[in-house]
Amino acid sequence: MRLYCPEGFACDVTYGNGGFYKDIKPPKYKFDIDPQSDDVIAACSSAIPLPDAFLFSIVFDPPFLTYVRQGRNHNSVMAKRFAGYWRYDELSAHYIATLKEARRLLKKDGVLVFKCQDIIHNHKMHCTHANVIEWAKNVGFRLEDLFVLPVKHRMPIPPTQGHAAKIQRHARIHHSYFLVFK
């Protein structure tokens, strides 16, 4: 934020409960598909009710989990805490639609900060950060910077209870990316 938006972020299109802003100034415009406070406007990140070329900066910190059904009725601790998608193509469609919307909303030389995480879906590695860079390029953004954020706490892997031990097939992912686009 200090490098690209020293006045603070103008808009967060996936505000959630505002935890991202615990130690920094919250944005003026706050949107979320499932508002958790009265100062957040209900809207999907792909359809924000603001005029064209209205904002200088946008933060997009979307869900990244797959195999999560609507309503968070999943056994995973992460799935109960965060929203997600059932399939990777749902994730990609939402990310692409939001990139297009951010392009519409941003002023010339505006900044989009896009947080994402690579995932394993259906036993296949998806380099989401690389996909997002390509999708963003296709709608007119240029990658300005990339930050890698290691997680502060790793979720323990639950022991198997009466089931055969799960075989690890991929490296554990313990980081996310902040991609800065202009």
Image (spheres, rainbow, N blue to C red):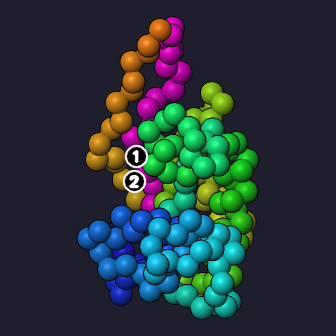
Which quadrant is the N terminus positioned in?
bottom left
**Secondary-structure class at tag 1:** strand
Q: Is residue 174 left or right of residue 41?
A: left
**Disc 2: which residue:** 148
Q: Which residues are magenta?
A: 163-182
Q: Residues within 10 Å of mark 1 (few under 14, many from 20)?
A: some
Query: Residue 175 bears which disc, if any?
Result: 1
Q: Amino acid at mark 2?
A: Val
Indicate the position of residue 55 as horizontal and vertical percent values: 55, 88
Kind of element beneath mark 2: strand
Give the quadrant of residue 174.
top left
Residue 91 position within the rendered picture, expressed as x and y whole percent measured from the top left: 66, 51
Q: Nearer the viewer, residue 43 or 139?
A: 43
Three-letter residue code for mark 1:
His
Left or right, residue 39 beside residue 49? left
Q: Quadrant of the C terminus?
A: bottom right
Q: Please tell me whether residue 175 is drawn above or below residue 46 in the rendered image.
A: above
Q: Are marks 1 and 2 in contact (CB under 8 Å)?
A: yes
